[in-house]
Amino acid sequence: MSSVFETQKTIREILVKILDNHSLDQLNKIPEGYKNNLIWNVAHCVASQQVLVYKLSGLPMLVSDEFVGKYSKGTKPERDVTQEEVDEVKELLIKTLHQTQKDYENSVFKNYNEYKTSMGFDLRNVQEALDFVSYHEGIHTGIIMGIKKFI
Protein backbone atom coordinates (compact mmCIF):
# COMPACT_ATOMS: atom_id res chain seq x y z
CA MET A 1 0.00 0.00 0.00
CA SER A 2 2.98 2.32 0.28
CA SER A 3 2.89 3.00 -3.47
CA VAL A 4 -0.54 4.65 -3.24
CA PHE A 5 0.80 6.99 -0.57
CA GLU A 6 3.91 7.71 -2.63
CA THR A 7 1.67 8.61 -5.58
CA GLN A 8 -0.50 10.85 -3.43
CA LYS A 9 2.57 12.46 -1.84
CA THR A 10 3.91 13.35 -5.29
CA ILE A 11 0.55 14.76 -6.38
CA ARG A 12 0.22 16.80 -3.20
CA GLU A 13 3.77 18.16 -3.62
CA ILE A 14 2.78 19.34 -7.10
CA LEU A 15 -0.33 21.00 -5.63
CA VAL A 16 1.72 22.75 -2.93
CA LYS A 17 3.99 24.13 -5.67
CA ILE A 18 0.93 25.44 -7.51
CA LEU A 19 -0.09 27.33 -4.37
CA ASP A 20 3.45 28.59 -3.78
CA ASN A 21 4.07 29.74 -7.35
CA HIS A 22 0.85 31.63 -8.08
CA SER A 23 -0.41 34.93 -6.74
CA LEU A 24 -3.65 35.20 -4.81
CA ASP A 25 -5.25 36.80 -7.89
CA GLN A 26 -4.11 33.89 -10.08
CA LEU A 27 -5.36 31.30 -7.58
CA ASN A 28 -8.79 32.98 -7.51
CA LYS A 29 -9.18 33.64 -11.26
CA ILE A 30 -11.81 31.54 -13.05
CA PRO A 31 -10.87 31.47 -16.73
CA GLU A 32 -13.55 31.60 -19.39
CA GLY A 33 -14.90 28.12 -20.05
CA TYR A 34 -14.12 26.89 -16.51
CA LYS A 35 -16.43 26.63 -13.50
CA ASN A 36 -13.72 26.76 -10.87
CA ASN A 37 -10.25 28.11 -10.18
CA LEU A 38 -6.88 26.80 -9.04
CA ILE A 39 -7.53 27.09 -5.31
CA TRP A 40 -10.95 25.44 -5.55
CA ASN A 41 -9.46 22.44 -7.38
CA VAL A 42 -6.68 22.04 -4.83
CA ALA A 43 -9.04 22.35 -1.85
CA HIS A 44 -11.51 20.00 -3.57
CA CYS A 45 -8.82 17.30 -3.56
CA VAL A 46 -8.50 17.63 0.22
CA ALA A 47 -12.26 17.69 0.83
CA SER A 48 -12.93 14.70 -1.43
CA GLN A 49 -10.15 12.61 0.13
CA GLN A 50 -11.60 13.27 3.57
CA VAL A 51 -15.12 12.23 2.56
CA LEU A 52 -14.03 9.17 0.57
CA VAL A 53 -11.58 7.85 3.14
CA TYR A 54 -12.72 9.04 6.57
CA LYS A 55 -16.43 9.84 6.36
CA LEU A 56 -17.27 6.69 4.40
CA SER A 57 -15.24 4.72 6.95
CA GLY A 58 -17.45 6.15 9.70
CA LEU A 59 -14.57 8.14 11.18
CA PRO A 60 -14.31 11.84 12.01
CA MET A 61 -12.85 13.88 9.18
CA LEU A 62 -9.71 15.94 9.69
CA VAL A 63 -11.40 18.98 8.12
CA SER A 64 -14.59 20.79 9.07
CA ASP A 65 -17.98 20.11 7.54
CA GLU A 66 -17.89 23.75 6.41
CA PHE A 67 -14.67 23.10 4.47
CA VAL A 68 -16.20 20.04 2.82
CA GLY A 69 -19.38 21.95 2.02
CA LYS A 70 -17.40 24.71 0.36
CA TYR A 71 -15.27 22.42 -1.83
CA SER A 72 -17.49 19.39 -2.52
CA LYS A 73 -18.43 18.14 -5.96
CA GLY A 74 -20.92 20.46 -7.56
CA THR A 75 -19.87 23.57 -5.65
CA LYS A 76 -18.09 26.55 -7.11
CA PRO A 77 -16.23 29.50 -5.66
CA GLU A 78 -18.68 31.94 -4.10
CA ARG A 79 -15.98 34.54 -3.37
CA ASP A 80 -12.24 35.00 -3.57
CA VAL A 81 -10.26 33.17 -0.90
CA THR A 82 -7.85 35.02 1.36
CA GLN A 83 -4.16 34.31 1.78
CA GLU A 84 -4.98 32.78 5.18
CA GLU A 85 -7.32 30.33 3.48
CA VAL A 86 -4.66 29.45 0.91
CA ASP A 87 -2.21 28.82 3.76
CA GLU A 88 -4.78 26.57 5.46
CA VAL A 89 -5.31 24.54 2.27
CA LYS A 90 -1.55 24.19 1.85
CA GLU A 91 -1.20 22.91 5.40
CA LEU A 92 -4.12 20.52 4.96
CA LEU A 93 -2.58 19.04 1.80
CA ILE A 94 0.35 17.79 3.85
CA LYS A 95 -1.32 17.16 7.20
CA THR A 96 -4.27 15.12 5.91
CA LEU A 97 -2.11 12.85 3.77
CA HIS A 98 0.38 12.26 6.58
CA GLN A 99 -2.42 11.44 9.04
CA THR A 100 -4.20 9.18 6.55
CA GLN A 101 -1.04 7.15 6.00
CA LYS A 102 -0.44 6.92 9.74
CA ASP A 103 -4.06 5.86 10.36
CA TYR A 104 -3.85 3.28 7.57
CA GLU A 105 -0.65 1.82 8.98
CA ASN A 106 -2.28 1.68 12.43
CA SER A 107 -5.34 -0.18 11.02
CA VAL A 108 -7.74 2.59 12.04
CA PHE A 109 -9.97 1.95 9.00
CA LYS A 110 -12.08 -1.05 9.99
CA ASN A 111 -15.46 -0.38 8.32
CA TYR A 112 -16.46 1.15 5.01
CA ASN A 113 -19.83 2.24 3.63
CA GLU A 114 -19.79 1.20 -0.02
CA TYR A 115 -20.07 4.07 -2.46
CA LYS A 116 -20.44 4.40 -6.22
CA THR A 117 -18.64 7.46 -7.54
CA SER A 118 -20.20 9.70 -10.16
CA MET A 119 -17.68 8.19 -12.60
CA GLY A 120 -19.03 4.71 -11.92
CA PHE A 121 -16.31 3.35 -9.65
CA ASP A 122 -17.56 1.07 -6.88
CA LEU A 123 -15.64 1.74 -3.68
CA ARG A 124 -16.09 -1.21 -1.36
CA ASN A 125 -13.28 -0.63 1.14
CA VAL A 126 -10.68 1.91 2.17
CA GLN A 127 -8.04 0.43 -0.16
CA GLU A 128 -10.30 1.02 -3.16
CA ALA A 129 -11.07 4.51 -1.84
CA LEU A 130 -7.36 5.32 -1.59
CA ASP A 131 -6.76 4.03 -5.12
CA PHE A 132 -9.61 6.20 -6.39
CA VAL A 133 -8.29 9.24 -4.51
CA SER A 134 -5.03 8.94 -6.48
CA TYR A 135 -6.98 8.83 -9.74
CA HIS A 136 -9.26 11.70 -8.69
CA GLU A 137 -6.39 13.94 -7.60
CA GLY A 138 -4.61 13.17 -10.87
CA ILE A 139 -7.68 14.34 -12.81
CA HIS A 140 -7.81 17.58 -10.86
CA THR A 141 -4.09 18.12 -11.32
CA GLY A 142 -4.75 17.91 -15.06
CA ILE A 143 -7.58 20.44 -14.76
CA ILE A 144 -5.23 22.71 -12.82
CA MET A 145 -2.64 22.48 -15.60
CA GLY A 146 -5.34 23.51 -18.07
CA ILE A 147 -6.42 26.48 -15.94
CA LYS A 148 -2.79 27.62 -15.61
CA LYS A 149 -2.65 28.22 -19.38
CA PHE A 150 -5.35 30.89 -19.10
CA ILE A 151 -4.23 32.85 -16.06
Image: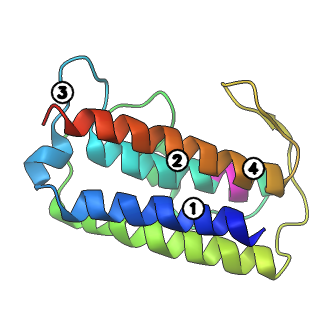
| Image x and y of residue 150, in percent | 15, 31
Q: Amino acid at mark 4?
A: Ala
| Residue 117 visible in rendering | yes
Return the residue nearer the eye: 55 or 131.
Answer: 131
Q: Which mark is residue 31?
A: 3
| Image x and y of residue 22, in percent | 15, 55
Return the residue nearer the eye: 97 or 74.
Answer: 97
Residue identifier under label 2: 137
Cβ–Cβ under 8 Å for marks 3 and 4: no
Q: Residues within 10 Å of mark 3 (few under 14, many from 20)?
A: some
Gap in Å between the C-alphas at discs 4 and 1? 12 Å
Residue identifier under label 4: 129
Q: Residues within 10 Å of mark 2 (few under 14, many from 20)?
A: many
Residue identifier under label 1: 8
- What span is colored magenta in the figure? 51-55
Q: Amino acid at mark 2?
A: Glu
Answer with mark 2 or mark 3, whichever residue precedes in sequence: 3
Mark 4 vs mark 1: give the one in front: 1
Gap in Å between the C-alphas at discs 4 and 2? 12 Å
